Image: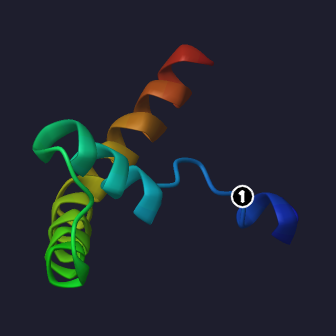
């Protein structure tokens, strides 16, 4: 697989996504301190489930294409 495909982003989450979620939940954008905490929580949560998700996605793809 070429490098361009290897670097393709599958599911981006942006600061705008976090801020839009904050507006929906708390009625305003987060300040810098809140945003820093939210980013750290997102990183922690995503890294905790990433290996499980990657494993399941790979296994499902292989199983469906046998």
Choose top left, top right, bottom left or bottom right for residue 7: bottom right
User: Quick check: 63 above or below 20?
Assistant: above
* Quadrant into which the N terminus falls: bottom right
Residue shown at the point (54%, 29%) measured from the top left: 62
Which residue is denoted by mark 1 in the rendering? 8
Residues 12 and 49: in front is 12
Residue shown at the point (26%, 72%) measured from the top left: 39
Q: Is residue 42 left or right of residue 10?
A: left
User: Quick check: 10 above or below 60?
Assistant: below
Residue shown at the point (43%, 36%) measured from the top left: 57
Please count the marks in the image.
1
Q: Is residue 8 left or right of residue 64?
A: right
Q: At numbered mark 1, what does the secondary structure look like: helix, strand or loop?
A: loop
Rendered location of residue 18, percent (x, y): 32, 56
Choose top left, top right, bottom left or bottom right for residue 64: top right
Residue shown at the point (45%, 57%) measured from the top left: 16
Rendered location of residue 46, percent (x, y): 26, 59
Q: Is residue 29 left or right of residue 62?
A: left
Rendered location of residue 50, percent (x, y): 30, 56
Rendered location of residue 4, percent (x, y): 85, 65
Residues 63 and 45: in front is 45
Q: Residues within 10 Å of mark 1 (few under 14, many from 20)?
A: few
* Quadrant into which the C terminus falls: top right
Its colouring scheme is rainbow
User: Quick check: 30 above or below 21?
Assistant: below
User: Quick check: 10 above or below 58?
Assistant: below
């Amino acid at each position: 697989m070429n490098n361009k495909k290897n670097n393709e982003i599958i599911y981006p989450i942006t600061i705008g996504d976090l801020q839009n979620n904050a507006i929906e939940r708390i009625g305003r954008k987060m300040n810098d301190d809140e945003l820093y905490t939210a980013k750290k929580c997102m990183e922690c949560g995503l890294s905790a489930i990433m290996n499980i998700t990657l494993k399941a996605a790979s296994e499902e793809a292989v199983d469906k294409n046998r």
